[in-house]
Amino acid sequence: MILKDFRDLELAVATGENNFTMNRGSFSYKQSISGKKKLKILSKKEDMDGIRFSFEGGHVIVVKEKDGKITLDYEGDPKDGVNRYWITFSADPREHIYGCGETYSKFDLKGEKIRVWVAEHQNVGRISKKVIKRATIGRILGPQPEKTGKFSSYESYYAQPTFTSSKKYYMHVYTDAYSEFDFTNPNRTTLYLQEPPHLVTESGKTFAEVSKKLAGTLGTVHSWAEPKREYPLPDWIYDGAILAVQEGTERVDEKIQQAVRSGAKVCGIWSQDWSGCRRTGFGYQVMWNWVVDDELYPNLREQIVKWKEQGIRFLGYINPFLAIEKDIYKEASAKGYCVKNKEGEDYLVTITTFPAAMVDFTNPKAYEWYKDLIKKNMIGLGMGGWMADFGEYLPVDAVLYSSDDPEVIHNKWPAIWAKLNREAIVESNVEGDVFFFTRAGHTGTIDASTMMWTGDQHVDWSVDDGLISVVPATLSLAMSGYGITHSDAGGYTTYGKLLSRSKELLQRWMEMNVFTPLLRTHEGNQPVNDVQWYDDEELLAHTARCSRMHAALKSYLMSLTADTQEHGTPVMRPLFYHYNEDRAYTEKTEYLLGPDVLVAPVYKEGSLSRKVYLPGDSWVNIFSGKEYGGGTFEVDAPIGQPPVFVRKNSTRYQEIMSLAEM
């Protein structure tokens, strides 16, 4: 983007009031707006440094360019309660737009309006509709995985006021309040903001250059500056699979030995119920009381040491909530550490079927107290990592210790949560050995979180919530500046037999996740209704082979994550990142793993082949050895051999081709 794109800048203002209704982290949003007015330009002064727009009513916008960086800043003096701003500027009708955080059903956002508001992506309404349709229409018409809802019906765990264009520029808006990015007009882009406009945009000759500049703006490169990255990911996470097992020390050890006997390379075991469990109508859930449940996990500390001697780390789970029936909540409540409602009581938020309290991270004492829980009860226990879940649920009618407006703090909450987790690791001097991964995000998350996962996908083949939805989600994060992402192999969200994981789905998901930064399984919220990796000998063999392939990618993956941390280049990239072809700009079911590997996951049930688009280059199928040029091909893909290709002229060619022998 260049300065002249702002010459026809338009500004409209209004006074407004929000009305949010939250149900289990999903937000219904309405607002009342009065006095909206497109403002007349009283003067426009242009010089070598930029353009100064003076609008009626004392509103001033200054656009400056320095060293290739364009900034837009509001310098006006708003009157009459103005708190709504619409900034409109030129757009190219041929460009494609990506980012704004994490989007699942679409990748190219041109033609859409994006709501930048952190929320629970998997809301109760959409899940209920899917289950009802399967129980009624689905019995007649069969599965309809290609069906999607209106784009506006989807919310996102990770919402960020940042986008990247196919014209090789990014734009980031400095705002934490609710906002909307409107790309519906092919010739104009409109940013609707509830804070005075401040933004930055930069262009690059390549997408790698754009990513590096964006990383600099968001803090990533600065945080991991040379000569030493401040917080690299542990080397051990690439040594195989992190396998999900729950329900006690004895059962976990039994499954570890079963996996090892099958020939699996196991680098970690993830037991999310380390702090206990609760059984609800939703399924088998974690007890949110962040201390080891000695009854369920006797002698866990000693066992963690033994597993680590075998090269297997133990991982757990934590979130910002507290179970109100347990002692840790009672301590927090007694100390006044919980988020309050307007009556001064602890604000209890319903999650699935039960209420929970939230710790108020704006209270410095509460923040440090919660951090100490992680240091003592998780790191002190010997954990190698954990899932730092949630972050989306701060109610907008809450009362915070800091007296900050929760409508502004709401979006910042995931970044504050990630920062707390990161500080616990740094202050415990276990950087490079212990890590965590998050699902919620906003500006600031990138600088604090070490890895994302794409949330609670459905255990099915649906394009908007199932296996393949993780690809556009990952790529949109990549184009928002976040480059290290993975997903629950097999998905999570289960609802009886109407929405349950099949053997084939688990196998296809695992083989896809081989070619991501982390291979980690999940048992789902209803493990008894989902196929698990240990259910039969074929699944054990498949898991073992996938784990060996992932371990064989260690050197390549480490080089990619290092590049992300040093330069902002994402590990998993859209095809257009390296290939300037029309089809590459709209492809959302394939991705590049670094510059050398192209992955086209099988995402249709019962398919033993898939149609693959290959950009112009020399590609070799790592399983069949067949060579391809650019074009579209029907590629055989039996289970265990997804369409994965390596560039023939890659320096990593032999290394990648050896995966087929694992």
Image (tube, rainbow, N blue to C red):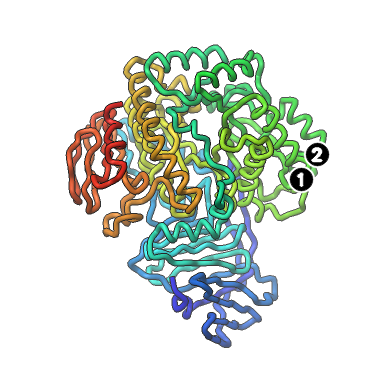
Please name the amino acid that badge 2 sits on: Gly
Residue underneath mark 1: 363
Q: Residue 409's x, y, as percent? A: 66, 52
Vertical placement of residue 632 versus 660, above or below: below
- Point 65% across, 67% down: residue: 83
For marks 2 and 1, the one nearer the N-term is 2
Q: Secondary structure at mark 2?
A: loop
Q: How many marks?
A: 2
Q: Residues within 10 Å of mark 1 (few under 14, many from 20)?
A: some
- Point 40% across, 64% down: residue: 168
The N terminus appears in which quarter of the rendering?
bottom left
Residue underneath mark 2: 336
Q: Residues within 10 Å of mark 2 (few under 14, many from 20)?
A: some
Please name the amino acid that badge 1 sits on: Asn
Q: Nearer the viewer, mark 2 or mark 1?
A: 1
Quarter of image, res 558: top left
Q: Residue 263's x, y, as percent? A: 37, 18
Q: Secondary structure at mark 1?
A: loop
- Point 54% across, 25% down: residue: 313
